[in-house]
Image: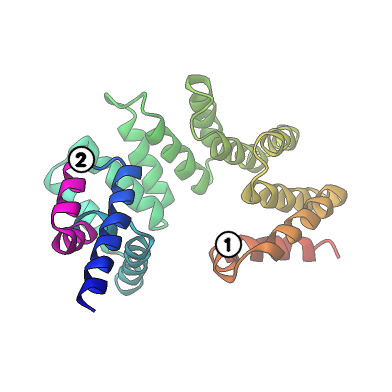
Amino acid sequence: MEIFGIGIHILVAIFFAVHAVRNGQPIYWLLILFMFPLIGSVVYFIAIYLPSSRINQGARKVASVAVKTLDPGRELREAREAYEYTPTAQNQMRLASALLEGGNAAEAATTYEACLQGPFSGDLEIRFGAARATFAAGRADDAVSHLQTIRAANDGFRAEQVSLLLAQAWAAAGRQDEARAEFEHALSRYSGFTTQAEYAIWAAGAGDTDKARALDVELRRTIERWTPQTRDLNQPLIKRLNAAMAGLR
């Protein structure tokens, strides 16, 4: 029985050693694991394995959702307080993001665009935030301008997201031909579920019944293969798709 216990310790140490090698951990972890199999495995599990595991990631997500549910205004409140106390560019960016996530698109757009006036004028992440905020605030033309600036600077930056948002911004600006062309561009290059669904929703609203239904067929096949968890994550988009398709019947 004692020998069996020692064997288990060694097997566990080997498991963590393989994990260490595959994940590029320092070589001293191998020494610790094989010189002290039991205590070394415990330390490695707590220090390295657990923080990178799916279990821990899942726990963090659950905790994050719980915090947002119990105190939905916490991040915005803390971001505003941080910026008022220390008005740095980083705190201003944090405030802009919190405003957008909190549903205050107009103030978020103003804050993002203020960030672009200083040394971060070339920061594409900030400009993408400005594009999202101006679009959400109903300023479609400004969103188009921000997105075209991003694409001109680096057409590989968030390529699918930029293309999809640009198509939606063109549509919101009443430029339906440009919207269709951009949706087709996004579909031909990326063809992700979100892109297909948003194209189908737009096509249904634009009266392109054939395109909407053709996309819907492919989308239903994708949804059928999903796990219940994946369906739950995409439920808001699925509901919008269902509503758009129901309008065609």
Dividing the image into 4 quarters, which one contains the N terminus? bottom left
The residue located at (58%, 62%) in the rendering is 234
Query: Does the magenta run of residues contain 50?
Result: no
Residue 73 lies, with reference to residue 168, above or below; the image says: below
Circle 1: residue type: Asn
Please state the horizontal and vertical placement of residue 196, each as a whole percent of the image: 69, 48
Please state the horizontal and vertical placement of residue 137, each as a whole percent of the image: 49, 47
Label 2 crowd bin: few (<14), some (14–19), many (20+), radius 10 Å: few
Q: Which label is found at residue 178? A: none
Q: Can residue 132 be seen in this view?
A: yes
Query: Does the magenta run of residues contain 36?
Result: yes
The residue located at (26%, 66%) in the rendering is 7
Quarter of the image where one finds residue 28: top left
Residue denoted by label 1: 234
Left or right of residue 221: residue 44: left
Circle 2: residue type: Ile
Q: Disc 1 on helix, strand or loop?
A: loop
Left or right of residue 156: residue 99: left
Quarter of the image where one finds residue 52: bottom left
Q: Which label is found at residue 27? A: 2
Residue 143 lies, with reference to residue 53, above or below; the image says: above
How many numbered dots are placed on residues in this image?
2
Label 1 crowd bin: few (<14), some (14–19), many (20+), radius 10 Å: few
Left or right of residue 198: residue 154: left
Q: Disc 2 on helix, strand or loop?
A: loop
**From which residue to which does the magenta span run?**
27-46
Residue 223 vs residue 30, the one in the foreground: 30
Residue 227 vs residue 155, the one in the foreground: 227
The residue located at (70%, 32%) in the rendering is 185
Q: Could you tell me what secondary structure mostly forms the magenta stretch?
A: helix
Residue 246 lies, with reference to residue 219, above or below; the image says: below
